[in-house]
Amino acid sequence: MKPTLLVLVYLSEEHRALVSERFDMIYAPNEGLGKDRSNGAAQIAARGSDIRVVLTNGTNGLLATEIDALPNLELICTVGVGFENVAFDHASRRNIPVCNAAGTNDAAVADHAMAILLAAIRRVPFLNSGVRNGLWRDDIPRPPHVSGRRMGIFGLGAIGRQIARRAQGFDMEIGYHSRTRRDETGFRWFNDIVSLADWCDFLVIAAPGGKATYHIVSTDVLNALGPNGVLVNVARGTLVDTDAVADALRDKRIWAAALDVYEGEPTPPARLLEFENAVLTPHIGGISPQAIHASVLRFLENAEAHFAGRSLLTRVN
């Protein structure tokens, strides 16, 4: 008899078929934390005692009350790296492993970080729209180039290191601040994000979300980044104070912001929509067909290891 799995996130038909080969799958995707959670809630109420595994993501998470309503829960997994809205400590107290899909979308996120950085510096959205309305290069100030400048990375984990590798292809000097100092990289270490922002031209945010990093990108950080600086966020929206970014763009205290994530997703950040130099994408950085498939496979690998009594590949608690 196959174990019962509750899926709280969207999966393609192909991946639902793949997962169903190994699980009695209850497919009930929610819209996210604080949004409509009725799909999952209804299934938890109806079949809570049957469910042994939950597949969610960092945005949807799994609440402590939901964990309590699942008396036979053995394993929680997330599609993607994030797990910030999983009741992590609560799961640990019940000795329920929590696994993410680390290592499956690093390249996709790093690619996207560079794409939106380049778009912001070279003003690609503005130029694309302008050409369609008769714009020619003689009519505008020349956008700055990218190569040979300084990139500061806040969070030098797997994704941060992938971004650094790409930046080196543009002959950039790399500095960073991270929970773990990585002298083996040869990159320049900074004690805090303000000093990092003061040094660099481009500040890329690639650190985990949560209380410890809430609004870590503040007015002080943006002022340190300066009028030629560009902020890039491919981590979580909560790390960046949206109002502070809007004020900095309005006052021309930074050159541009390129954000794949923002507070209040999926609602667009209203205060940033008026700025041509705010490049916004819909939390798509880690989403590619290749990355999603790898993430589903990682979930299946962790589940297989769990039921076989082996060590989990990417346990985070």
Image: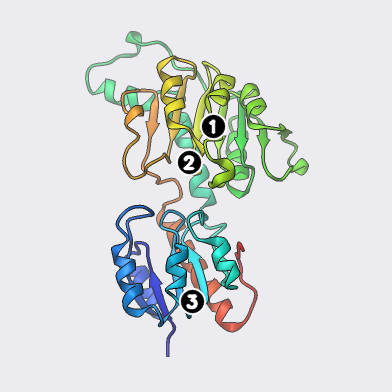
Horizontal and vertical percent position of residue 32: 36, 55
For the point 51% across and 20% down, the residue is: 145
For the C terminus, give its image quadrant: bottom right
Q: Secondary structure at mark 1?
A: loop
Q: Residue at x 39, y 73 (%)?
A: 6
Q: Amino acid at mark 2?
A: Thr
Can you tell which mark lies on residue 217? Answer: 1
The answer to whether residue 148 is seen in the rendering is no
Q: Is residue 156 left or right of residue 218?
A: right
Residue at horizontal 34%, vertical 67%? 40
The mark that comes first in sequence, 1 or 3, is 3
Q: Residue at x 31, y 78 (%)?
A: 46
Q: Nearer the viewer, residue 65 or 79?
A: 65
The amino acid beneath tag 1 is Val
Between residues 181 and 33, which one lies in front from this camera angle? Answer: 33
Marks 3 and 2, Cα distance to the nearest angstrom?
Answer: 29 Å
State the SS at label 2: helix
Gap between marks 1 and 3 measured at Cα: 37 Å
Which residue position is annotated with label 2?
A: 238
Q: Residues within 10 Å of mark 3 (few under 14, many from 20)?
A: many
- Considering only order in the chain, which callout, 2 or 3, is on the residue closer to the N terminus? 3
Q: Which mark is residue 73?
A: 3
Q: Are marks 1 and 3 in contact (CB under 8 Å)?
A: no
Amino acid under disc 3: Leu
Q: Quadrant of residue 225?
A: top right
Bin the neighbour count of mark 1 within 10 Å (Cα to Cα): few under 14, some 14-19, many 20 and up: many
The answer to whether 131 is drawn above or below residue 13 in the figure is above
Q: Residue 215: image x %, image y %?
A: 52, 36
For the residues bearing labels 1 and 2, Cβ distance under 8 angstroms:
no
Out of 216 and 102, give the one closest to the viewer: 216
